[in-house]
Image (cartoon, rainbow, N blue to C red):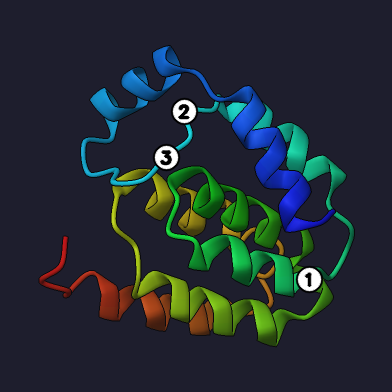
Protein backbone atom coordinates (compact mmCIF):
# COMPACT_ATOMS: atom_id res chain seq x y z
CA UNK A 1 0.00 0.00 0.00
CA UNK A 2 1.32 3.44 -0.87
CA UNK A 3 1.80 6.24 1.63
CA UNK A 4 -0.46 8.56 -0.36
CA UNK A 5 -3.30 6.03 -0.21
CA UNK A 6 -2.84 5.56 3.54
CA UNK A 7 -2.94 9.30 4.11
CA UNK A 8 -6.06 9.63 1.98
CA UNK A 9 -7.78 6.98 4.11
CA UNK A 10 -6.60 8.60 7.37
CA UNK A 11 -7.89 11.99 6.24
CA UNK A 12 -11.24 10.55 5.21
CA UNK A 13 -11.68 8.64 8.50
CA UNK A 14 -10.62 11.46 10.80
CA UNK A 15 -13.12 13.19 13.03
CA UNK A 16 -13.02 15.88 15.69
CA UNK A 17 -14.61 13.74 18.42
CA UNK A 18 -11.92 11.08 18.14
CA UNK A 19 -9.21 13.74 17.99
CA UNK A 20 -10.43 15.43 21.17
CA UNK A 21 -10.83 12.11 22.97
CA UNK A 22 -7.33 10.98 22.07
CA UNK A 23 -5.84 14.30 23.18
CA UNK A 24 -7.37 13.81 26.64
CA UNK A 25 -5.54 10.49 27.08
CA UNK A 26 -2.36 11.48 25.25
CA UNK A 27 -1.89 15.19 25.95
CA UNK A 28 1.57 15.35 24.39
CA UNK A 29 0.25 14.76 20.87
CA UNK A 30 1.28 17.61 18.60
CA UNK A 31 0.10 16.37 15.24
CA UNK A 32 -2.78 13.99 14.57
CA UNK A 33 -5.66 13.09 12.29
CA UNK A 34 -8.22 11.99 14.86
CA UNK A 35 -8.65 8.41 13.61
CA UNK A 36 -9.83 5.44 15.65
CA UNK A 37 -7.39 2.60 16.32
CA UNK A 38 -9.71 0.21 14.49
CA UNK A 39 -8.98 2.11 11.27
CA UNK A 40 -5.24 1.71 11.87
CA UNK A 41 -5.68 -2.01 12.59
CA UNK A 42 -7.55 -2.42 9.30
CA UNK A 43 -4.74 -0.64 7.44
CA UNK A 44 -2.11 -2.91 8.99
CA UNK A 45 -3.89 -5.93 7.53
CA UNK A 46 -3.57 -4.45 4.03
CA UNK A 47 0.19 -3.85 4.12
CA UNK A 48 2.35 -6.32 2.24
CA UNK A 49 5.35 -8.11 3.71
CA UNK A 50 8.75 -6.39 3.94
CA UNK A 51 7.67 -2.80 3.32
CA UNK A 52 10.27 -1.23 5.60
CA UNK A 53 10.44 1.88 3.42
CA UNK A 54 6.77 2.58 4.16
CA UNK A 55 7.40 2.11 7.88
CA UNK A 56 10.20 4.66 7.82
CA UNK A 57 8.14 7.19 5.86
CA UNK A 58 5.23 6.83 8.26
CA UNK A 59 7.52 7.34 11.25
CA UNK A 60 9.27 10.36 9.75
CA UNK A 61 5.96 12.22 9.38
CA UNK A 62 5.80 12.69 13.18
CA UNK A 63 2.00 12.36 13.00
CA UNK A 64 0.57 10.37 15.92
CA UNK A 65 -1.50 7.87 13.91
CA UNK A 66 1.24 7.38 11.33
CA UNK A 67 3.75 6.52 14.07
CA UNK A 68 1.29 4.11 15.67
CA UNK A 69 0.73 2.57 12.25
CA UNK A 70 4.49 2.31 11.62
CA UNK A 71 4.92 0.49 14.95
CA UNK A 72 2.07 -1.91 14.23
CA UNK A 73 3.32 -2.69 10.71
CA UNK A 74 6.83 -3.27 12.04
CA UNK A 75 5.34 -5.81 14.42
CA UNK A 76 3.61 -7.54 11.55
CA UNK A 77 6.62 -7.85 9.22
CA UNK A 78 9.54 -7.73 11.64
CA UNK A 79 10.56 -11.33 11.14
CA UNK A 80 11.21 -10.74 7.44
CA UNK A 81 14.43 -8.94 8.39
CA UNK A 82 15.12 -9.04 12.10
CA UNK A 83 18.29 -6.93 11.81
CA UNK A 84 16.44 -4.15 9.97
CA UNK A 85 13.64 -4.34 12.53
CA UNK A 86 16.07 -4.04 15.42
CA UNK A 87 17.80 -1.10 13.73
CA UNK A 88 14.46 0.70 13.32
CA UNK A 89 13.45 0.00 16.92
CA UNK A 90 16.72 1.55 18.11
CA UNK A 91 16.18 4.60 15.93
CA UNK A 92 12.49 5.02 16.71
CA UNK A 93 12.96 4.59 20.45
CA UNK A 94 15.13 7.71 20.46
CA UNK A 95 12.35 9.76 18.84
CA UNK A 96 9.28 8.86 20.90
CA UNK A 97 7.17 11.80 22.03
CA UNK A 98 4.28 10.17 23.89
CA UNK A 99 3.36 7.12 25.94
CA UNK A 100 0.93 5.63 23.38
CA UNK A 101 3.52 5.42 20.62
CA UNK A 102 6.04 4.11 23.17
CA UNK A 103 3.67 1.35 24.29
CA UNK A 104 2.82 0.37 20.73
CA UNK A 105 6.46 0.19 19.66
CA UNK A 106 7.49 -1.66 22.82
CA UNK A 107 4.73 -4.27 22.65
CA UNK A 108 3.69 -4.60 19.03
CA UNK A 109 6.77 -3.34 17.18
CA UNK A 110 9.02 -6.04 18.62
CA UNK A 111 6.45 -8.83 18.51
CA UNK A 112 7.99 -10.89 15.70
CA UNK A 113 11.60 -10.62 16.89
CA UNK A 114 11.27 -10.72 20.67
CA UNK A 115 12.54 -14.29 21.05
CA UNK A 116 15.20 -14.04 18.37
CA UNK A 117 16.61 -10.67 19.50
CA UNK A 118 15.78 -10.83 23.20
CA UNK A 119 19.29 -9.88 24.36
CA UNK A 120 19.48 -6.84 22.05
CA UNK A 121 16.00 -5.65 22.99
CA UNK A 122 16.82 -5.84 26.69
CA UNK A 123 20.00 -3.84 26.09
CA UNK A 124 17.97 -1.10 24.39
CA UNK A 125 15.48 -1.20 27.27
CA UNK A 126 18.21 -0.85 29.89
CA UNK A 127 19.44 2.32 28.24
CA UNK A 128 15.97 3.78 27.81
CA UNK A 129 14.83 3.27 31.40
CA UNK A 130 17.69 5.53 32.49
CA UNK A 131 16.73 8.27 30.05
CA UNK A 132 15.93 11.70 31.44
CA UNK A 133 13.45 12.14 28.58
CA UNK A 134 10.36 10.50 30.04
Position above or below: 60 against 40: below
User: In this image, 106 relative to 9: left or right?
Assistant: left
**Is any part of residue 114 visible from this angle?**
no
Quadrant of the snapshot with the C terminus: bottom left
Secondary structure under tag 2 reads loop
The percent coordinates of residue 44 (x first, y second) are 75, 44
Quadrant assignment, res 85: bottom right
Q: Position of residue 51 (x, y in %)?
A: 80, 68
**Residue at image coords 76%, 32%:** 42
Contact between marks 2 and 3 (CB within 8 A): the answer is yes
Alpha carbon distance from label 1 to label 2: 30 Å
Question: Residue 94 lies in what quarter of the image?
Answer: bottom left
Q: Position of residue 132 (x, y in %)?
A: 10, 71
For mark 3, what is the residue? 32
Q: CA distance from mark 2 to mark 3?
A: 6 Å
Tell me what residue is drawn at x 45 percent, y 72 percent. Answer: 92
Q: Earlier in the sequence, mark 1 or mark 3?
A: 3
Q: Residues within 10 Å of mark 2 (few under 14, many from 20)?
A: many
Toward the left, the furthest residue is 132
- Residue 114 in the image: above or below residue 40: below
Q: Nearer the viewer, residue 101 or 121?
A: 101
The nearer-to-camera label among 1 and 2 is 2
Q: Mark 3, residues whose alpha carbon is within 10 Å: few (<14), some, or many (≥20)?
A: some
The label shown at residue 104 is none
Give me the residue at 16% from left, 75% from top.
Answer: 130
Residue 34, numbered circle? 2
> Can I make out residue 38 in this image?
yes
- Is 12 left or right of 48, judged from the image as shown? left
Amino acid sequence: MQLSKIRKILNSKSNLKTKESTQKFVPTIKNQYGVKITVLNDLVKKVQKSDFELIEKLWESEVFEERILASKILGKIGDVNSQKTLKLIKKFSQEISDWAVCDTLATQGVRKIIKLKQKEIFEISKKLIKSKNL
